[in-house]
Structure formats: C-alpha cells, structure tokens
Image (spheres, rainbow, N blue to C red):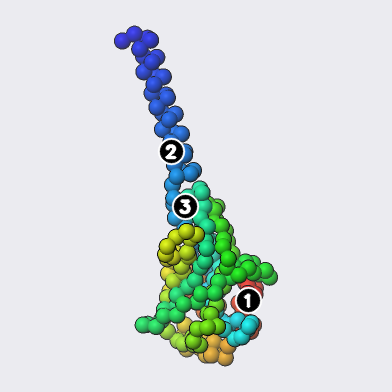
Amino acid sequence: MTDTTLLTIFGVAISLLALGVSTATMYFAWLRRGRLAMTRPAVVFFGYDVVPELTPKIFLRTLLYSTAQRGKMIESMFVKLRRGTTEQVFGFWGYGETTKLSPGSGLYVGQSGVSLNHHFVLSVHQPEYEFVAGEYTIQVFARQAGASAPILLSEIRLTLDDRNAATLARHAGVLFELEPDTQTYAGHASERSGKPAEYSQGP
C-alpha cells in the first residue's frame, strides 16, 4: 500500500469522523425532542386564597427543566389531589416569585431550567373542597404548546395529620417541608391567613 493510498484513507476517515460529530451535534442541539421534567419540591403548602373569595389552594416551589437544548413551551399546568378514592383538580395556575405572580399563560423552560413558585387554586366554579386528615398524592401535570394531552411531571406523597387538618379547618395553612434524610414531608401550621410564610403571596 502506497503512501498516497494511506493518506487518502486517512483523509476519508477524518472526513467521516467530522461528519459524525457534526451530525451528533445537530441532533443534540436541534433534532432531539427530549422531555420536560421537574425536581422534587422542597416545600409544599395547603391553604387558601382570599381573592375573589376564600378558595383552597396548593403551593409548591420547584425547578422545571428541559432535557433538550431547544427547550419546551408550557401552555398550562394543573394538579390532581388524590386522597383514597377521591380526586380533585386544582386548575387555576399562577407562577412567579414572592411579591410578583403571573396568571399561568405560558412559560418557556430551557435546558438550564427555571425555578419558580407555583400556585394551583381550585376554580370558583368547582364544588367546595375540604382538606381532611389522611394520605395525599399530588400529581403535577403540564400541557405543552401543540400537544394533544398533558404529561405527568411528578407525584408527591404526604400525610396530613389530625392536628394540621384542624389548622386547615379554621382556614389557616399547613407548610410541608422535605426532610433531607428521609425524603418525606413534615407538615406544620402556617397561620398567616393561609399563605406560606416567606415563600409566596397569593395570585
């Protein structure tokens, strides 16, 4: 095999390698759809909003992120609250920070993620809901722009004991904090008009 042939083979190999790298880069940068995901919330809150009337709400803070570089556009979010055989949808969504909230009307989520407070309020058109003692599962859903169905982002399980249920019965709030060692949620009363102290203000 001559030197010219070796150089030709080497050149072809380098070209094919460069083509492979370019193709992989294009796939990961533009073609890979990826998925929308969220981290486990460090805090979850059961309580009430007072405007336009006293209405049950669920609050949580989490990081939403996309596994694709292109990012994802969220059209809407909602939660389903399950206890035993009962299920209730909290469909009015607002997000933001401590003093400024936006009604949920679209949110772009990039690969680096976005960390926000999320408020899910029971629609005033829904029957009255009562928080009672028991085991709860919170299912967080998001509907992406152009999608035909929402996707399940997370399931959060926690326990509302009798003492905290009594707190909610008098329309105060209960803040659940994630224990770092057991990865379970411990709840305690938050008496500030049903709003989670230091975390949020109702939409």
Task: Give the mark count.
Answer: 3
Amino acid type, callout 3: Thr
> Which amino acid type corresponds to the residue marked 1 in the rendered image?
Gly
From the image, tell me which residue sits under label 1: 202
Query: Residue 132: x and y, percent?
Result: 46, 87
Measured in 3D between alpha carbons, the distance from the residue under mark 3 to the one under mark 1, in whole angstroms, is: 30 Å
SS at circle 2: helix
Q: State the image coordinates of residue 111 (x, y, percent, origin top left).
A: 52, 52
Q: Residue at x 44, y 33 (%)?
A: 21
Q: On the picture, is 195 further left or further right than 187?
A: right
Q: Earlier in the sequence, mark 2 or mark 3?
A: 2
Question: Would you say 170 lies left or right of 148 here?
Answer: right
| Residue positioned 47% across, 38% down in the render | 25
| 3D distance between C-alphas at marks 2 and 3 | 16 Å
Q: Residue at x 42, y 69 (%)?
A: 155
| Residue furthest to the right | 99
Query: Which percent across, then down, holds residue 127?
Result: 49, 87
Mark 2 closeness class: few <14, some 14–19, many ≥20 residues within 10 Å: some
Q: Mark 3 = which residue? A: 67
Question: Which residue in the structure is indicated by mark 2?
Answer: 24
